[in-house]
Image: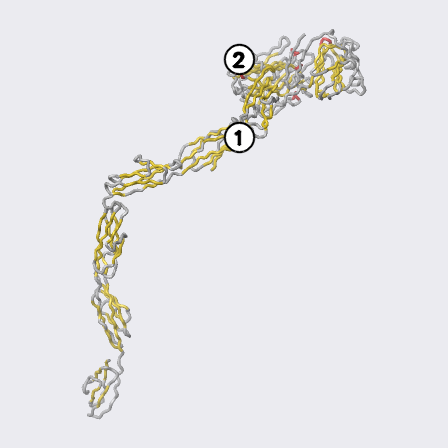
């Protein structure tokens, strides 16, 4: 008798499938309804049963038990489930009995009971050795009956041939949860996940699987992309199907009812297919050697398998899929490094039978993508080799192929990094293991919800390898609040050159960084960018984004400060004296003399310069230069405006120092004035003294003279005349003269001039001395007297006579002709003309 032990995930019911070659003599109890074998609990498995002369014939009761497949003696099991759920039932006939038209049925009551209904049936034909009722949904509390019929033997008639068989009943295995569609790890490196876009570093093998013996050859295989699955042909001559191929894209395998994707879930870019849907003794393998590090210590391989399940094949003849991980010394790594499945064990391994496969219908079974984690901690620093193998059946008519991929993770708990310490956080252990137990708390399952998490809280999870149940690994991790920090705040001075490096960090090593600036102009995605020092104060903002969805914003500032405005006095001193230089505008100072005080005292022998560098509170510097001028003793310059004046006018004297140490003080002899300029109005030539004293108490005296020239004394005699007359005016005492008003004058300048105004007029005459420009003024009155009105009465005399003539109206009179007059003057004269005579009298007033 041969036995084979298969182990399953703890999430599935554990089935210990024992395949036993039996003979007809292994007889057990009658299987009628009345004496049906009771199944108390699941899983249930019994071997070595026979219907030899023991079973009732339930053919036709009910009609679903056809005479073709239930004509022989029937064996009955009964089962009352305690919970509602799905079961799988399997009958394996002894091939040596050559079964023919066998039958297997599930009824909701005894077949002879009224209203009995077949929940499911399976019918065999010539040579069928296995009948299955899969995914039968049973209701808790209902008693169900399983009927097994041997049909008839091809060697015997009537149909009462004895048949040996095994019977198995188990709850439907819980399929592994679908793999997450989000990345669960990182590339392992060394092209383990085909991340390089090729199969470089992988070694491919092809060979044959013959019944005696079953071997895998080591002929290098063919690496291609999305190679053909091939024809649905046994023993292909041309070998159309690609035996090693890298798969890409979003397609699905047609032999899995388009359930299995050709690329593993989880944002994988490509996967690897080993084998194809062509049978013909083909065997393939792919292997890869890699170094174990702390980054890939949790090595996860993913696989999806497609196997035909041919009837009449022993386990050793079935298509199969193998995985092995070995050390550099060739030893198998038992914890997660060994896996094998054959087609006849597909049901118990969680496979699903395809409903409508294009090849191998109806016995094509597939297992969707499954992740198996392997803790390689003991092998850090060593090389290990993983090999995937697919094998067709040994009889050349049935295929087996698989899809594989890998990813790696450091040994850590996912979810310990949180954006905020909110109400809860979900911690997730590494995928691909089983029997997860969390501490503290004792929770089970790959994930656990932690309410009110605390930053720094420590959690530990233990788990077992799916294909090495005795292998336990533990991971301890700490709740970490995702934070971000940034350094680089800097204060610079205007004009600074160079670069500044910022350093942004996050407690999430997977965070990304996005930098911008205000004013705009700088962008970067580096966590440690360098920037050219700006000319104005600039704020640099970085957005730190975690793959978990956290977004943190931080900023740094480069503050650009102005330099100080440094001022310093620049004095003038006399030789041998000292002076103090005082700086302002800074917080600290450094002089060219190396002094660091605000003020310094110096005494240069000659004019000298001193540099002071001031630093403000921002650290910015600026310099100023003080010049100490060593000057000779004071000298005075005097400017008199004008230096010569006419009597009655004023002059201004202005003094200035032409040497010495300012500031200067001035003292004048004019009333003690202290201004730089004074005015004086002397009546005669006068000297004025000014004394200038500088800041070094040196003094100098200077004398200014204002010369006073005399004004001319202009004189002119008054004049008078009678109406119609004129007068000559002669001025003296000057060189040139100007008369005003000009009315009645001829000319109006010079001397003498003729005046003939019609009325009495006063004239002003200004005389100027040509040499000095001094002037003198006087007035003259020209009186215009009216002419007198002379009245003389006429007279008549006899010849020889005389007559007095008396004139009036004037002061004096002149008579003409005077020959016959007693007098030529006077108001009264006696005329003794001898002939009539006309006398003219001129009267003057």
> Which quadrant of the figure has residue 631?
top left
- Quick check: 803 left or right of 420? left
Residue 831 lies, in percent from the top left, at: 20, 88
Q: Earlier in the sequence, mark 1 or mark 2?
A: 2
Camera-nearest residue between 412 and 598: 598
The front one of 197 and 599 is 599
Q: Which tag is nearer the camera, tag 1 or tag 2?
A: 1
Is residue 779 shown to the viewer in this render? yes
Within-10-Å neighbours for mark 1: few <14, some 14–19, many 20+: some
Disc 1 target residue: 545
Given residues 822 and 133, the one toward you in this image is 133
> Which percent across, then down, holds residue 619?
39, 35
What is the secondary structure assignment of the residue under circle 2?
Answer: loop
- Residue 261 found in image quarter: top right
Mark 1–mark 2 Cα distance, whole angstroms, equals 41 Å
> Could you tell me which secondary element the residue under label 1 belongs to?
strand
Q: Determine the residue located farthest toward the front in the rendered image.
A: 441
Question: In the drawing, does residue 589 fall left or right of residue 191?
Answer: left
Q: Dividing the picture into quarters, in which one does residue 24 lie?
A: top right
In the picture, the disc for residue 328 is 2
């Amino acid at each position: 008798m041969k036995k084979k032990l298969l182990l399953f995930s703890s999430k599935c019911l554990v089935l210990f499938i024992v395949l036993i070659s039996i003979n007809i003599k292994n007889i057990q109890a009658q299987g009628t309804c009345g004496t049906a074998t009771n199944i108390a609990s699941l899983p249930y498995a019994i071997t070595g049963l026979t219907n030899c002369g023991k079973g009732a014939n339930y053919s036709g009761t009910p009609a679903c038990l056809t005479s073709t497949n239930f004509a022989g003696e029937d064996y009955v099991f009964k089962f009352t489930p305690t919970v509602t759920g799905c079961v799988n039932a399997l009958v394996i006939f002894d091939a040596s009995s050559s079964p023919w038209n066998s039958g297997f049925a599930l009824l909701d009551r005894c077949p002879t009971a009224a209203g009995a209904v077949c929940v499911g049936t399976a019918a065999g034909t010539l040579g069928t050795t296995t009948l299955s009722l899969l995914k039968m949904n049973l209701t808790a509390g209902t008693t169900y009956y399983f009927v097994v019929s041997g049909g008839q033997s091809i060697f015997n008639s009537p149909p009462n041939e004895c048949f040996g068989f095994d019977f198995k009943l188990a709850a439907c295995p819980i399929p592994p949860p679908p793999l997450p569609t989000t990345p669960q790890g990182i590339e392992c490196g060394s092209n383990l996940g085909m991340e390089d876009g090729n199969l470089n570093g992988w070694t491919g093998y092809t060979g044959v699987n013959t019944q005696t013996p079953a071997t895998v050859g080591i002929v290098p295989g063919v690496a291609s992309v999305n190679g053909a699955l091939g024809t649905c042909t046994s023993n292909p001559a041309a070998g159309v199907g690609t035996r090693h191929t890298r798969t890409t894209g979003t397609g699905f395998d047609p032999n899995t009812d388009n359930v299995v994707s050709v690329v593993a879930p989880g944002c994988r870019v490509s996967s690897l297919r080993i084998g194809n849907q062509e049978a013909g003794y083909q065997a393939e393998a792919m292997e890869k050697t890699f170094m174990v590090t702390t980054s890939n210590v949790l090595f996860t391989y993913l696989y999806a398998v497609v196997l035909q399940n041919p009837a009449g094949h022993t386990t050793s003849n079935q298509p199969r899929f193998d995985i092995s991980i070995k050390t550099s010394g060739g030893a198998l790594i038992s914890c997660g490094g060994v896996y094998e499945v054959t087609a006849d064990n597909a049901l118990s391994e969680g496979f699903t039978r395809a409903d409508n496969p294009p090849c191998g219908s109806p016995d094509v079974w597939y297992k969707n993508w499954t992740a198996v984690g392997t803790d390689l901690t003991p092998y850090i620093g060593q090389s290990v080799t993983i090999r995937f193998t697919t094998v067709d059946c040994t009889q050349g008519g049935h295929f087996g192929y698989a899809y594989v991929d890998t990813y790696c993770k450091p040994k850590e708990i996912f979810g310990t990094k949180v954006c905020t310490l909110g109400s809860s956080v979900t911690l997730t252990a590494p995928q691909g293991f089983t029997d997860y137990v969390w501490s503290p708390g004792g929770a089970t399952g790959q994930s656990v919800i932690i309410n009110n998490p605390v930053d720094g809280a420590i959690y530990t999870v233990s788990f077992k390898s799916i294909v090495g149940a005795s292998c336990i690994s533990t991971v301890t991790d700490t709740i970490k609040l995702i934070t971000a920090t940034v350094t680089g705040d800097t204060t610079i001075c205007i004009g600074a050159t160079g670069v500044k490096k910022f350093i942004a960090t996050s407690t999430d090593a997977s965070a990304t960084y996005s930098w911008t600036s205000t004013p705009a102009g700088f962008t970067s995605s580096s966590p440690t960018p360098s920037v050219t020092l700006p000319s104005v104060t600039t704020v640099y903002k970085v957005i730190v984004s975690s793959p978990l969805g956290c977004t943190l914003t931080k900023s740094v500032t480069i503050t650009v400060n102005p330099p100080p405005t440094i001022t310093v006095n620049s004095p003038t001193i006399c030789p041998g004296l000292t002076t103090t230089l005082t700086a302002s505008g800074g917080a600290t100072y450094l002089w060219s003399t190396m002094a660091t005080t605000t003020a310094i005292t110096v005494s240069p022998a000659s004019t000298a310069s001193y540099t002071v560098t001031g630093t403000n509170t921002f650290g910015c510097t600026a310099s100023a230069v003080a010049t100490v001028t060593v000057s000779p003793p004071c000298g005075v310059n005097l400017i008199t405006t004008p230096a010569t004046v006419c009597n009655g006018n004023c002059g201004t004297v202005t003094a200035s120092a032409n040497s010495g140490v300012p500031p200067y003080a001035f003292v004048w002899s004019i009333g003690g004035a202290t201004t730089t300029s004074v005015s004086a109005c002397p009546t005669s030539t006068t000297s004025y003294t000014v004394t200038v004293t500088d800041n070094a108490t040196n003094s100098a005296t200077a004398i200014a003279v204002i010369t006073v020239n005399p004004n001319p004394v202009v004189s002119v005699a008054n004049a008078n005349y009678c109406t119609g007359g004129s007068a000559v005016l002669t001025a003296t005492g000057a060189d040139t003269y100007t008369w005003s008003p000009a009315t009645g004058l001829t000319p109006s300048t010079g001397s003498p001039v003729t005046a003939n105004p019609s009325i009495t007029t006063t004239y002003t005459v200004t005389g100027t001395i040509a040499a000095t420009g001094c002037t003198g003024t006087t007035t003259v009155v020209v009186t215009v007297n009216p002419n007198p009105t002379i009245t003389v009465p006429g007279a008549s005399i006899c010849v020889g006579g005389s007559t007095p003539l008396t004139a009036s109206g004037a002061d004096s009179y002149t008579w003409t002709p005077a020959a016959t007059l007693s007098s030529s003057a006077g108001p009264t004269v006696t005329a003794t003309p001898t002939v009539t005579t006309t006398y003219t009298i001129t009267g003057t007033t």
